[in-house]
Image (cartoon, rainbow, N blue to C red):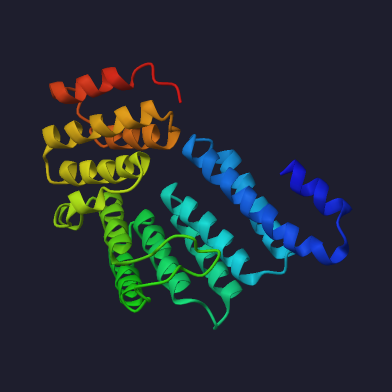
Amino acid sequence: MRLIQSLAQSAPAGQRPRLAGVGSEAASLAAWLAWDMGDNGSARTWYGSAIKAARSAGDSLLAAYQIGSLAQFEAHAGNGAQALTLASAARRSLGPQRPAIADAWLSSVEALAHAAAGDQRAADRALIRSRATAERLPLEGPPPWPWVFVFDEAKVAACRVTCGARLGLADWVLTADTAALATGHAKQRALVVLDIAAGHLAAGRVEAAFALASRALDTGIEYRSGRIVERARTVRRSITSTSPPKVVREFDERLHGVYL
C-alpha cells in the first residue's frame, strides 16, 4: 500500500485513477487477510480504505464489489441490518447495467444478512433469486473483473448451508450434498465443515457435530486462522449444558490455550 501511495503521489494526473483502483484491490486483500486472522477491527478499516480508493478511481463496479465485500463480512459477523444496508448501497453503485454475476453474488450476501438477522423467509427468497440468476450465467469464460471467481449453483448451495447453520435449520444443512460442497482450499473447507457441524447440532447429533468441529479446529490451528477458531468457538457456545458429554469436554480441552 505504501508503494502504491508513493507511486500515485508522483504519477501524472491521468494515471492516478488507475493506481487508486490498484490500491483498492490491495486494501481489499489486506482486509481479507485481517478477517482470516480474526482481526475484525483491522478488516473493517481495510475494507473502508478499499471502498474509498475505488470511489477515487471513479470505478462504480469496483466500488460495488468492495461495498459488497464489506457487506459479506458484516453478515458473517452477525450484523444483519448493517450488511443489508451495505448490500443495498452496492446495488445502487452498480446501477441498472450490472453484470449477472454481481446480481447473483449480492443476492447470496443478502441471504446471509437475513440469516444473521434471523429472518428465514427473507433468506430463502434471496437464495432463490441468487440461484435463478446463477443458472443463467455463462458456463464458459472468465467472470468479469473485479469478480475473479466463478459464482455458480454450488456457491449458492454452500451459502444455503451457511444460512441454515446460522438459523439452526438442520434440513437446510444436512439435505445438501455436503461432501461436494466441502471443496477448495483447506481453510474454506473447514468453514463449510463447521456449518455442517452446526446442522448436526440443530438435529441433536452432538457426537457427529463435534467430530466434525474437531477436524475443522485442527485446520484452523494448522493455518493459524483466527476466523476458523472463532467459528469453532461459536459452535461450542451453542451447547449450554452444565454437564456436556465427553466429546464436548474433549473439544473444550482442544480450545483451551488456543490464542489466535
Res 234 quadrant in image? top left
Q: Position of residue 76 (x, y in %)?
A: 42, 49
Res 115 quadrant in image? bottom left
Answer left or right for 11 relative to 44.
right
Q: Position of residue 69 (x, y in %)?
A: 52, 57
Residue positioned 65% across, 58% down in the render: 51
Q: Position of residue 215 (x, y in %)?
A: 24, 31
Residue positioned 34% across, 18% down in the render: 256
Answer left or right for 118 relative to 12.
left
Q: Is residue 61 visible?
A: yes
Looking at this view, name the residue that lies furthest to the front: 141
Residue positioned 13% across, 36% down in the render: 208
Q: Position of residue 133 (x, y in %)?
A: 36, 76
Residue 133 position (above or below residue 56): below
Residue positioned 28% across, 34% down in the render: 216
Res 135 quadrant in image? bottom left
Looking at this view, name the residue that lies furthest to the bottom: 96
Taking depth in this image into account, of 179 and 142 the one nearest to the observer is 142
Residue 83 position (above or below residue 121): above
Answer left or right for 25 relative to 122.
right
Image quadrant containing the N terminus:
top right
Q: Is residue 244 visible?
A: no
Residue 248 position (above or below residue 199): above
Taking depth in this image into account, of 114 and 208 the one nearest to the observer is 208
Taking depth in this image into account, of 55 and 169 the one nearest to the observer is 55
* Count of residue discs: 0
